Image: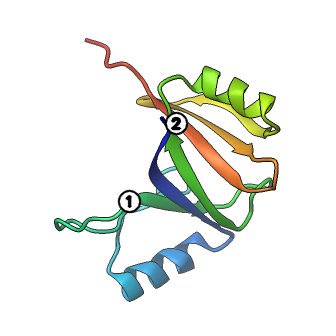
Amino acid sequence: MGRVIGFELNSQEPEKAAEFYSKVFDWEISEPHWDYRAVITGISEKAGIDGGIGKGPNDYPHGTRIQIEVNSIDEAISKAKNNGAMIVREKMEFDDFYLAYLIDPVGIGFGLIQKRENKA
């Protein structure tokens, strides 16, 4: 089952967005890395879902996307396509995870994320 594990806030002014959410909601926002700022929304027993704020790409300049964790990103992409989704960004490889961006049949953007196996 896919589980929502994070979010992205995309903006053409990510520094301004980071300042806003930090001041209004006391979110802890890291320094930018690849134009992306990691966000911690809470550290108490009522901690929320963490995410990030970044400069929105041309294909998604403004808005919010959830990140859905899956066991197999390839299988999830295939199932999503077979059910009417459109791939915006093919599977990308990062140090600790794989990530792809899709749009569902009604136009809602989301990310699929699969954690990579630890290399011992």
Q: Quadrant of residue 24?
A: bottom left
Compare residues 51 and 72 and report the one nearer the observer.
Answer: 72
- Residue found farthest to the left: 45
Asked whether disc 2 touches disc 1, contact meaning CB atoms under 8 Å apart, the reply is no
Q: Position of residue 8 (x, y in %)?
A: 55, 59
Residue ID at (48%, 84%): 20
Left or right: 31 as drawn, with respect to 67: left
Quickly name the residue at label 2.
113
Vertical order, 104 against 81 (above or below): below
Compare residues 60 and 3 and report the one nearer the observer.
Answer: 3
Q: What separation in Å lies between label 2 and label 1 (alpha carbons)?
A: 15 Å
Quick one: SS at disc 2?
Answer: strand
Q: Position of residue 111 (x, y in %)?
A: 61, 45
Quickly name the residue at label 1.
49
Quick one: SS at disc 1?
Answer: loop
- Residue found farthest to the bottom: 24
Mark 2, other Cα within 10 Å: few <14 / some 14–19 / many ≥20: many
Q: Position of residue 108 (x, y in %)?
A: 73, 56
The residue type indicated by label 1 comes to: Ile
